[in-house]
Image (cartoon, rainbow, N blue to C red):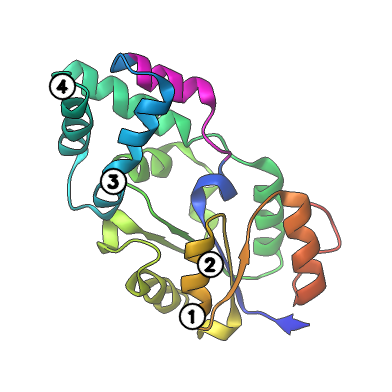
Amino acid sequence: MRKLKAVVFDYGNVLSLPQDPRDIESMALCLALETSEFLNLYWQFRLPYDKGEIDAGEYWSEVAALCGVMLTASLQADLVRLDNSSWSRPRREVLSWVESLQKSGMPTAILSNMPADLQKHIETSCDWLPAFTHKTFSCQVKSVKPEADIYHHCLDGLNSVPEAVLFLDDRPDNIAAARNLGINAVLFTTPEDTLQVLQSNFQLPCLNSSF
């Protein structure tokens, strides 16, 4: 059983619930697209947006241009609002465990690919965010997972070595990159299944209680 000194969480699909299909449909409707077509365009330019290489206007202009739509200020505002909302539903069972870790004195951090618009939104709307010891957002550090730099930024913020940190993320490529750096990384699937993996491998406060 490995003893740890910090736990790091991805944001989307770990601390927050997956995007609701209705949010996707609403964004697609704004651009007169089928949902599947919209999703292909949505992710095509997402990493540059997450990385802060382009802003919301540039990102949504690229998406709109490929479907023959002129991006107006009003349309951009609607898309940003819907996008932010789609990532803003907290996963309460995971946040409950996070709170238990924090009360036990265990440092916690967020390591997330996230555009500046969403980062600003959650900073003002999530009352649980300030309790995290450290937050690394891709838009601020100009690096995205699975690039090594963003992991190093998080480790530096925690003042910790990789082998003392547990990282939870829902993407296998991000998990592989973390493990290559020596971080204890576990793929987040469901809260229940993830809890079983953690209970079998790590010494952490409150693991005897479910998410």
Q: Which residue is mark 4?
A: 71
Q: Nearer the viewer, mark 3 or mark 4?
A: 4
134 part of magenta stretch: no
User: Which x, y percent locates residue 77?
Assistant: 25, 23
Element class at badge 1: helix
Mark 1 and mark 2: span between their CA atoms? 9 Å
Q: Are marks 2 and 3 in contact (CB under 8 Å)?
A: no
Residue at image position (67%, 41%) is: 92
| Label 4: few (<14), some (14–19) or many (≥20) C-alpha neighbours in 10 Å | some
Q: Can you tell which quarter of the image residue 113 is in?
A: bottom left
Say which quarter of the image contains residue 167.
bottom right
Disc assigned to residue 180? 1
Magenta-drawn stretch, dominant element (helix, strand or loop): helix
Which residue is tagged 2? 175
Residue at 30% in and 13% down = 32
Mark with earlier residue (1, 3): 3
Upstream in sequence: badge 1 or badge 4: 4
Amino acid type of disc 3? Ala
